[in-house]
Image (spheres, rainbow, N blue to C red):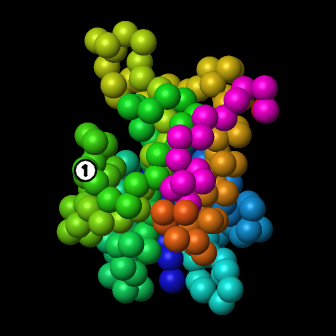
């Protein structure tokens, strides 16, 4: 069994903000596999599908971002899912818009959602898909304000393809070796003219 987690904030006002890119990718994966988030359990909306007989769960935590680990920890314990079989998809301000960096482990990079997941799993040994959302132009701009803004029109074109790219990477992660997935999908900037 594998667990795919999209990080974000529940609520209409957050739906298309930069901080919710994890939810957007989770929705794209569900759509690709023709499943929906039709149940809520363990502080998350849940969709599931199978690949070669293996059950794959996709969750969107219903806590706010800073408590995302509550749901992840509950699913990991209930289903006895090893950290290496968990992928967390989240926004990253340190990467340009449209970049994807896949990592097998590592620090939180200051991301509160990842800090929460590390705390509730008791390890940093889970896979993360870091999706670039760009950095505020003005260094003094409050980070919270920035991550809760929406992508502009130009960025939206990039992100439409980025979401598909990350969803494809998640599919590859289910069946392929992580190193192979990293080699294929890391540092892939989506060109605007492909939108």
Left or right side of 21 for 68: left
Q: Residue 90 placed where, x, y %?
A: 45, 48
Residue 10 in sight in this render: no
Left or right side of 16 for 119: left
Residue 84 against residue 19 in the figure, above or below: below
Question: Dividing the picture into quarters, in which one does residue 195 lie?
Answer: top right
Q: Was residue 185 drawn as part of the magenta stretch in this picture?
A: yes
The residue located at (41%, 18%) in the rendering is 136
Q: Was residue 49 drawn as part of the magenta stretch in this picture?
A: no
Residue 194 against residue 173 in the figure, above or below: above
The residue located at (33%, 25%) in the rendering is 143
The residue located at (62%, 20%) in the rendering is 152
Q: Which residues, given as a range, are shown in magenta?
A: 181-194
Q: Residue furthest bottom?
A: 53
Element class at badge 1: loop
Q: Residue 146 placed where, x, y %?
A: 42, 24
Between 184 and 22, the one lying in front of the other is 184
| Label 1 sits on residue | 107
Question: Dividing the picture into quarters, in which one does residue 144 lie?
Answer: top left
């Amino acid at each position: 069994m594998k667990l795919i987690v999209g990080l974000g904030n529940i609520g209409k006002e957050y739906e298309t903000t930069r901080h919710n890119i994890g939810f957007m990718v989770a929705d794209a994966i569900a759509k690709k596999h023709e499943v929906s988030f039709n149940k809520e359990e363990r502080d998350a909306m849940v969709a599931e599908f199978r690949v070669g007989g293996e059950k794959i769960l996709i969750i969107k935590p219903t806590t706010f971002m800073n408590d995302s680990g509550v749901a992840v920890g509950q699913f990991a314990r209930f289903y006895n899912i090893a950290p290496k079989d968990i992928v967390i998809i989240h926004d990253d301000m340190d990467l340009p818009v449209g970049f994807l960096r896949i990592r097998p482990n590592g620090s939180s990079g200051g991301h509160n959602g990842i800090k929460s997941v590390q705390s509730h799993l008791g390890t940093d040994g889970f896979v993360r898909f870091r999706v670039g959302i760009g950095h505020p132009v003005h260094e003094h701009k409050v980070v919270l304000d920035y991550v809760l803004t929406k992508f502009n029109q130009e960025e939206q074109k990039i992100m439409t393809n980025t979401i598909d790219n990350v969803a494809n990477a998640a599919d590859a992660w289910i069946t392929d070796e992580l190193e192979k997935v990293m080699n294929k999908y890391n540092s892939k900037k989506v060109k605007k003219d492909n939108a």
